[in-house]
Amino acid sequence: MNKTAIITGSSRGIGRAVAKRLAREGYNICINFVERQDKAEELLKELKGGGCSAVMCRADVGNRDQVNAMVGEAVKSLGPVTLLVNNAGVAGQALFQDVTDELWDKYFSTNLNGARNTIQAVLPGMLERKSGCIINISSIWGLHGASCEVTYSCTKHALIGLTRSLAMELAPSNIRVNCVAPGVINTDMVQVLGKDVLKELAEQTPLSRLGTPEDIANAVNFLASEEASFITGQVLVSDGGFVN
Ligand code: NDP
């Protein structure tokens, strides 16, 4: 059976690990990036070298036309999209009184509208086939409050609302929608915090380490698999026990 996955924001970090893991599971892979073409090309070469059918598409997920073009290219080159992983995201710290309209709109455009755009682009095909799987990458800050991360936290809470509601709407069409909520994962995104803060965060984590992109790829792979075929509308937290 054809298995094709689009993973948004898969040039780096969590998305890249998800793409590699799903390639090992036999998926055709559409790599998405917005700036780091070099990293996307590197991954494309690696996946193809391992025998995977893969393409890469530059698309700002917040831009509907670019997303539609990416999905069209993936379908044409790889076949019907059976799995969508909404991973592309931006984050940062700011006091709420300093949050500008531009910053607010950028976070919502990428983290939330991005998921809306990609889901609406793949949905007609999934509905026609009465089958599909959608996994949104939220955050533990989508379940809990985070000082100085109000905007980010709002977008990640909204992704969980999207997941739970859409799961109900699409279940009769045999399309599952789930969420993964990572804790602190050691990627480019968290490097701004600095070495000392990251060390403290690892110490505060009951499992005594930061998460790896591969930890999240494992959670995504489980939710995408047949073993999760009775699971929809759920949030799988992978955070080493950081919050409870
Ligand atoms: P990184 O910053 O390491 O990578 C971000 C990825 O998203 C890159 O591939 C980047 O592409 C892509 N991207 C950013 N903006 C856009 C856009 N507008 N359109 C398309 N792609 C875009 O982030 P992480 O891997 O750490 O995070 C991935 C997801 O996991 C995010 O949604 C994040 O919120 C979530 N998350 C991360 C946590 C962490 O601790 N790291 C914790 C909880 C959740 P390019 O390379 O081209 O710039």
Image: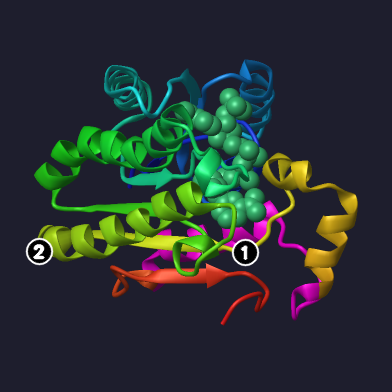
Q: Residues within 10 Å of mark 2 (few under 14, many from 20)?
A: few
Identify which residue is drawn at 48% across, 65% down: 222
Q: How many labels does the image show?
A: 2
| Rendered image quadrant of residue 212 | bottom right
- CA distance separating discs 2 and 1: 32 Å
Q: Is mark 1 on a helix, strand or loop?
A: loop
Instruction: Tell me where residue 174 appears, x and y as whole percent.
Output: 17, 61
Q: Residue at x 51, y 40 (%)?
A: 89
Type of amino acid at the residue the image marks with label 1 = Gly
Is residue 222 a member of the stretch shown in magenta? yes
N-term-proximal mark, 2 vs 1: 2
**Residue 211, quarter of picture:** bottom right
Which quadrant holds the C terminus?
A: bottom right
Which residues are drawn in magenta? 204-227
Q: Residue at x 30, y 21 (%)?
A: 76
Type of amino acid under label 2: Pro
Looking at the image, can residue 31 be seen? Answer: no
Residue bearing mark 2:
172
The residue under label 1 is 183
Q: 99 or 74, which lies in front?
A: 99
